[in-house]
Image: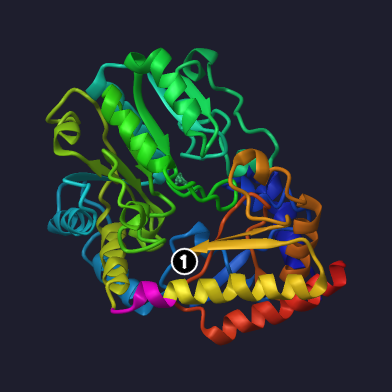
Amino acid sequence: MTDRNQTLFDRACRSIPGGVNSPVRAFRSVGGTPRFIERAQGPRVWDAEGKSYLDYVGSWGPAIAGHAHPVIVEAVREAALSGLSFGAPTEAEIEMAEAICARLPSVEMVRLVSSGTEATMTAIRLARGFTGRDAIVKFEGCYHGHADSLLVKAGSGLLTLGNPSSGGVPADFARHTIVLDFNDLDQVEEVFRARGDEIAAIIVEPVAGNMNLIKPRPGFLEGLREVCTKYGAVLIFDEVMTGFRVGPQGVQGVTGVTPDLTTLGKVIGGGMPVGAFGGRRDIMECIAPLGSVYQAGTLSGSPVAVAAGLASLKVLDEPGFYDHLAARTRRLVDGLQGAADAAGVRFSADALGGMFGVYFADTVPGSFAEVTTCDKEAFNRFFHAMLEAGHYFAPSAFEAGFVSIAHSEDDIDTTVAAAREVFVSMD
Ligand code: PMP
């Protein structure tokens, strides 16, 4: 068999930096050759050699309904036939905005953009414009896209490459970003006591998914809410990953903690490039053309992307969707845990809705410091052995995993059975 993935990768590296259009795809942290994907259907992807994999990446979250869901594909086809982009408003955009506002009580108004990065970047600008303050608080290991002031001690690809801050970010920008430890409320209170009148916003992944999956400790999000209210700062929940993924109302629905602004992406685009930011009306009215905070996008609210998003939200509304999704995800992590325990491998796993984390450590980590002590070499061995067996996990020990509604119980059990053999071989 020719290794077409390798041939394509060699070719890609000649014209694309690192051979990829987004760093984690390059397999730098796990080593080896990225799989070039030719097609995907339901829970599976097929690579350039025709090998199929049960996919637990799901395009990094959007593929919650499974790949190429017929309802979503048909909506895209129909929209495309009516024109790809107009740069003028459409009724479908209103429907999409209404659909988001109806589902998330904290969102009174919403604007669509084309990526999660745009959503978070604009939410920060909006919070600064609204409060007239410059500083922001973020947490180490949380990733909020690649805007300058958010690329400070961030997670995801930066963490995977072992360098959590980016080159090219002026120190003058970074100094407005205060980085604290996720799940450490005392630090937050201390910083606000000292500098509360300078801080425009706290931005947080309310369940972190870019340093593997890390849940908030009880009281952490509630505490952030209290501090923001007390000091007049804007609380931004970055639900680009968790929105419509951990439950029908994201983490805010699960915890009952209400942010001032929410950023969305991934699932709301059904696989097409869509992001959104929304929240309190008085804050959202500061955005142009109503207010002074500027934001725009040639392809924002793309009719094709909006059609995919609307169709996707309809699929999520099917009765029992989230119960089934959570049950499948739970079946996976419980199965993996049982298999690791049986083989005597140090392993733990956690899940929320359709999102999961696997950790080569005795207990589920609760902080960035804890997650970085997980056995990365063990993860890499697991990753490659599973990939070889036809199970595609995220190519990094610091990324969360995703299950779709198209993963059947049989699919999950097949993955668990493969993991059982892999764990035994790792002992
Ligand atoms: N915020 C979070 C929580 C994310 O997980 C991501 C992407 N992984 C982003 C923002 C950035 O989104 P995008 O890649 O669409 O720019």
- Camera-nearest residue between 379 and 54: 379
In this picture, is 156 found above or below 331?
above
Residue at figure coordinates x 51%, y 78% from the top left: 407
Q: Is residue 131 left or right of residue 63?
A: left
Disc 1 designates what residue? 354
Residue at figure coordinates x 35%, y 57% from the top left: 254
- Camera-nearest residue between 301 and 391: 391
* Residue 182 drawn at (x, y percent): 52, 37
| Most common SS among magenta residues | helix
- Camera-nearest residue between 424 and 380: 424
In this picture, is 426 found above or below 143?
below
- Where is residue 290, by image quadrant? top left
In the rendered image, the quadrant that contains the N terminus is: bottom right
* Residue 268 drawn at (x, y percent): 33, 58
Check residue 253 for magenta coloring.
no
Q: Quick one: which residue is furthest to the bottom in this view?
A: 410
In this picture, is 140 found above or below 410?
above
In this picture, is 218 found above or below 380?
above
In the rendered image, the quadrant that contains the C terminus is: bottom right
Range of magenta residues:
319-324
Check residue 320 for magenta coloring.
yes
* Residue 45 drawn at (x, y percent): 58, 72
* Residue 112 drawn at (x, y percent): 26, 47
Residue at figure coordinates x 46%, y 49% from the top left: 207
Q: Is residue 227 left or right of residue 94?
A: right
Judge whether residue 84 can be spotted in this image.
yes
Q: Is residue 83 left or right of residue 185?
A: left
Disc 1 residue type? Answer: Gly
- Camera-nearest residue between 263 and 353: 353
- Where is residue 99, by image quadrant? bottom left
Element type where label 1 sits in the image: loop
